[in-house]
Image (spheres, helix red, strand yellow):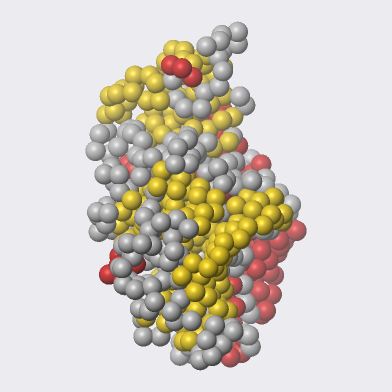
């Protein structure tokens, strides 16, 4: 299902400007309203409400109170006919201590009533462990005798005021054009960020949006344990950049009935979006959703046979192993093409005549000193497959009884919430790991990220949305099956080009940049996934051949990502863009970077995403802490391929540090926290190792 944002741009702008008001006793003027009558907050953030229950955000993160947004309707309801109820006469403010899975805190409730007969209660819970990150829930109760017809609601709506320096944004939504997750939010920028299906096989995502300026940022999202089809629109104007959470929920509210919003949050931060996603990850872990600890194998360097394309032959793949091993790569991944089709997953007899041939192939990988991993695209079934012929009952169908297309393979979706689909996939994964002997699976396809509601009558769903909300259970089954067969199995999740659905991340122990369109995507996806999965998450830069120039190893190594390649040797590979042969010149480069990677193993360190702002800091910078050392990576903007200026080494501790350009083996001198800005001249990238100097103090 594809949907548009419920509220049009003009309505959004009017609300943020406070120009939409309910008629009635409050009148049309709001000049009197913009005075705080209630405050809820902690040492980092205060949410203020005026007499009309308009809200604004005041940050104290800089050490002084800074008003980030003007009073505007932050929680509204839209009635049938697009009538927006936005003005509520303040009635009371209460607070009480709480202690739950998130720790100790204080819950504030602010109540008011509207001329339309709606009573609104805003609940904001501030926790000691999460300063400036209150959990938000809103209730609207019909106090009149006659029913009210509801179309939608909106919460956490705030416009970050312009400072004149511009805005950057992070969005967790998925789009068929595979756009950047991190984008400048220039005047006129708007993105609906719908968390349902935005194309036939592109949907879901991480339900968070963030906008920031150089000194401060704001964000909103939901913390439900299941995916929800909400919109999180970002709109940028000359006045500011706005965020909100909107849910279309058509219902009739009878007298005394209450509409409850989703469990959500609103937050403020400094620098970029990393702090928001990191806190969101920890909040969700408290609630039971957390990425697993990655096994050792998840960090090992990857070679994939995809350079030979689907039409590979076994001999050429096996003929590459010696070079793969020699260069220092640990994994050999057999990609798409081993099967007859998506769905049946029978062996292609031109490559593997019997299952004995497949097990022999796996043994050959091990004999070469490598680890075997196999490509798989669950939930896709091809036309003409036996599975589709015999089990049309497995299909995910829309409200018209039509199939849902998986465009890349010209396939159809299977329903992840239908038991026969679950059982069939469980047996397949068990066979790959337990019987064939693979030590990992590469789960692939943009369709894996999200699914549409399922209306197949054979499934007896209580609600069509069961397919959406139980997708994560399907991936849990896949992960648990693989780990049960081999506790050290690597389960790679690669939803090609999409913004990862957070609810799937607890069921994978390796995530790639997933078909990046640029080195910029390699880097900002890495920052995002380290925030969402943990500082030492096994994030892979994907095939280096997809990076800028096809050889930008620095963008993977510098940010603490796992290296990966699809080179062919000694002959050229296949495909429309085939240019993967490991020439002597390339071999020297590949060998150098593999040696650096294996010596440093930065993904196993702690990514320090809070130190730099990926949007406003120039040059772009990243930092990793490992074994008492600090590793810095600086990247020149594409518009300035030669950087000639200074770089700042943030996060240094006490004492002196010896600096080395560890790519070129160049001594860069000694610095301290007080002298952390150094001159630098480099092309494209500069990677620095900072080692504490014993006995030297600042």
- Identify which residue, 23 or 657, lies in the foreground: 23
- The quarter in which the N terminus is drawn is bottom left
Name the spot of residue 658 as percent of width and height, x first.
50, 15
- Name the residue located 44 percent from the left edge and 20 percent from the top edge: 676
Left or right: residue 406 compared with residue 183: right
Q: Is residue 653 visible?
A: yes
- Name the residue located 63 percent from the left edge and 80 percent from the top edge: 418
490 is higher (above) or lower (below) than 473? above
- Name the residue located 52 percent from the left edge and 16 percent from the top edge: 657
483 is higher (above) or lower (below) than 143? above
- Identify which residue, 502 or 149, lies in the foreground: 149
- Identify which residue, 275 or 664, lies in the foreground: 275
Left or right: residue 119 compared with residue 684: right
275 is higher (above) or lower (below) than 265? above
Left or right: residue 359 compared with residue 207: right
Name the spot of residue 629 as percent of width and height, x first.
57, 24
Name the spot of residue 662 as percent of width and height, x first.
46, 23
258 is higher (above) or lower (below) than 530? below
- Name the residue located 34 percent from the left edge and 65 percent from the top edge: 30
Name the spot of residue 174 as percent of width and height, x first.
43, 63
Q: Is residue 517 visible?
A: no
Which residue is outermost to the top? 695
- The answer to which image quadrant residue 617 occupies is top left
Q: How many marks?
A: 0
- Identify which residue, 617 or 622, lies in the foreground: 617
């Amino acid at each position: 299902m594809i949907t548009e944002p419920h509220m049009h741009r003009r309505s959004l702008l009017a609300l943020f400007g406070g120009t939409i008001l309910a008629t009635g006793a409050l009148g049309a003027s709001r000049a009197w309203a913009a005075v705080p009558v209630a405050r809820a907050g902690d040492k980092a953030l205060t949410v203020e409400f005026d007499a009309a229950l308009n809200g604004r955000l005041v940050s104290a993160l800089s050490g002084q109170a800074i008003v980030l947004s003007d009073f505007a309707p932050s929680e509204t309801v839209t009635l049938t006919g697009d009538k927006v109820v936005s003005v509520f006469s303040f009635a009371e403010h209460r607070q009480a201590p709480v202690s739950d899975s998130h720790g100790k805190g204080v819950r504030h409730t602010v109540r008011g009533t509207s001329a339309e007969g709606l009573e609104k209660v805003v609940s904001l819970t501030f926790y000691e462990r999460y300063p400036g990150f209150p959990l938000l829930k809103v209730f609207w109760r019909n106090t009149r005798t006659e029913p009210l017809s509801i179309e939608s609601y909106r919460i956490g709506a705030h416009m970050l005021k312009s400072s004149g320096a511009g805005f950057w944004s992070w969005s967790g939504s998925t789009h068929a054009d595979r756009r950047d997750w991190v984008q400048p939010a220039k005047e006129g920028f708007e993105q609906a960020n719908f968390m349902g299906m935005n194309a036939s096989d592109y949907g879901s995502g991480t339900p968070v949006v963030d906008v920031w300026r150089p000194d401060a940022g704001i964000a909103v999202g939901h913390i439900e344990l299941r995916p929800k089809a909400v919109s999180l629109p970002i709109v940028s104007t000359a006045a500011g950049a706005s965020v909100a959470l909107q849910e279309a929920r058509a219902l009739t509210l009878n007298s005394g009935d209450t509409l409850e919003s989703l469990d959500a949050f609103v937050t403020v931060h400094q620098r970029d979006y990393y702090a928001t996603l990191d806190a969101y990850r920890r909040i969700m872990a408290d609630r039971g959703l957390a990425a697993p600890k990655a096994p050792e194998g998840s960090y090992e360097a990857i070679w994939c046979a995809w350079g030979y394309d689907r039409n590979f032959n076994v001999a050429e793949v096996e003929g590459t192993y010696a070079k793969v091993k020699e260069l220092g790569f640990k994994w050999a991944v057999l990609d798409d093409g081993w099967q007859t089709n998506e769905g049946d997953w029978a062996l292609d007899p031109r490559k593997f005549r019997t299952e004995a041939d497949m097990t022999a192939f796996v043994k050959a990988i091990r004999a070469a000193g490598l680890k075997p991993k196999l490509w798989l695209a669950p939930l896709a079934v091809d036309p003409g497959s036996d599975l589709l012929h015999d089990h049309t009952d497995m299909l995910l169908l829309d409200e018209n009884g039509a199939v849902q297309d998986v465009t890349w393979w010209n396939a159809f979706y299977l329903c992840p919430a239908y038991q026969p689909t679950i059982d069939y996939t469980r047996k397949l994964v068990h066979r790959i790991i337990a019987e064939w002997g693979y030590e990992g699976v590469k789960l692939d396809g943009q369709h894996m990220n999200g699914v549409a509601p399922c209306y197949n009558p054979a499934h007896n769903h209580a609600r069509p949305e069961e397919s959406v909300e139980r997708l994560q259970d399907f991936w849990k089954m896949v992960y648990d099956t693989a780990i049960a067969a081999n506790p050290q199995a690597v389960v790679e999740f690669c939803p090609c080009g999409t913004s990862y659905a957070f609810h799937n991340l607890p069921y994978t122990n390796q995530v790639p940049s997933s078909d990046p369109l640029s080195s910029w995507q390699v880097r900002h996806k890495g920052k995002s996934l380290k925030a969402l999965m943990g500082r030492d998450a096994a994030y892979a830069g994907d095939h280096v051949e997809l990076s800028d120039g096809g050889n930008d190893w620095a963008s993977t190594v510098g940010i603490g990502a796992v290296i990966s390649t699809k080179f062919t040797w000694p002959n050229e590979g296949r495909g429309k863009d085939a240019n993967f042969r490991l020439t002597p010149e390339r071999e020297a480069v590949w060998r150098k970077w593999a040696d650096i990677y294996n010596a440093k193993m930065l993904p196993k360190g702690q990514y320090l995403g809070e130190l730099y702002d990926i949007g406003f800091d120039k040059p772009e910078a990243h930092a990793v802490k490992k074994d008492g050392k600090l590793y810095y990576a600086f990247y020149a903007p594409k518009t300035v391929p030669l950087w000639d200026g200074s770089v700042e080494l943030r996060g240094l501790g006490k004492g002196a540090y010896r600096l080395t350009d560890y790519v070129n083996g160049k001594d860069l001198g000694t610095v301290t926290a007080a002298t952390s800005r150094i001159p630098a001249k480099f092309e494209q990238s500069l990677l620095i190792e900072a080692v504490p100097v014993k006995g030297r103090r600042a």
